[in-house]
Image (tube, rainbow, N blue to C red):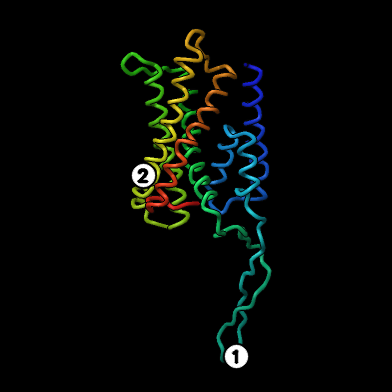
Amino acid sequence: MNTIAAFFVGSGIVSAVVIASDLPRRKQSMKIMNSVWILTGLWGGFFALWAYFRFGRAKRFAPVAAPMRMEAPDAGSMPMGNKAETHMPMDMGRDRPKWQSVVLSTLHCGAGCTLADLIGESFLYFVPVAIGGSAVVGGWALDYALALCIGVYFQYAAIRSMQMLPRKQAVVHALKADFLSLTAWQAGMYAWMAVVIWVLFRETGLSKMSWTFWFMMQTAMFVGFLAALPMNVWLIRKGVKKGM
């Protein structure tokens, strides 16, 4: 089991590295999505690579003519085009099939959860947190609080990029857009990890320093993704959040 777990965790790390190495040449039009794709690679592995190269990868940047101005008699200044070193991503504003838009919105939400769990579980290894005498419940509460903070920031960054709203209004919109989606993702994760902790590894326990633990966390992310997907469909349909 540990060998299989090491393979999948390793494939996640390799996938994240592949995506990260491609992004400097294919930067996302929405900056926060650069981080989203790398974080998705960590848990998504080959699925993340497929999604990135299938519909997530930005097209190459194209040169944009920056206007030059030439003074003309009795005509004021006239703009003239020249090929300056200004670039813009060719995928900006492109239309996507609805299913791709929903998947991207869900992955965007999940990236905050991924980063929160990486930080939270690493912290809990050194400083256990218990609620009601349960370290598991205490850990889940900490992970959820971190996920909410990071997830709302990710959503805030996306909203500011797409809509250019005032900061306060963007934060409120981000909270509305991400709260239910993030909660659904975390609920799916916790459901799987409950099975892992109290059923699959009830007798032996599972160390956070093992490959198997992080493979179970990768699997939990997949379950969280599946749980959050219909929630994002509903939120986009109701206009609570915009598809990406």
Q: Determine which residue is flagged by label 2.
A: 175
Vertical arrangement, residue 205 with respect to residue 145, above or below: above
Disc 1 residue crowd, few under 14, some 14–19, many 20+, Cα 10 Å = few
x then y, percent, for residue 55: 61, 49
In this rendered view, identify the residue nearer to me: 215 or 156: 215
Amino acid type shown at disc 2: Leu
Outermost residue toward the top? 203
Q: Is residue 200 above or below residue 104?
A: above
Evaluate if marks 2 and 1 touch, with contact meaning CB atoms under 8 Å apart: no
Number of residues whose C-alpha sits closer than 10 Å to that of mark 2, classed few (under 14), some (14–19) or many (20 or more): some
11 horizontally vs 185: left or right: right
Q: Secondary structure at mark 1?
A: loop
Instruction: Find numbered disc 2 in the image and state the secondary structure of the residue it sits on.
Output: helix
Identify the residue at image location x=61%, y=73%: 67
Badge number at residue 73 = 1
Residue mark closest to the camera, 2 vs 1: 2
User: Which of 114/235 is in front?
Assistant: 235
- List x then y, in percent, for residue 138: 37, 21
What is the three-letter code of the residue carrying label 1? Pro
Identify the residue shown where x is 67% and y is 41%: 21
User: Farthest residue in the bottom direction?
Assistant: 74
For residue 137, which numbered disc appears in the image?
none
Name the residue at 56% across, 91% down.
74
Q: What is the spatial separation of the Cα atoms under label 2 and label 1, in whole angstroms?
A: 56 Å
Measuring from the top left, give residue 210's x and y in whole percent: 57, 17
Q: Residue at x 62, y 59 (%)?
A: 90
Q: Earlier in the sequence, mark 2 or mark 1?
A: 1
Residue 143 pos. (x, y %): 42, 28
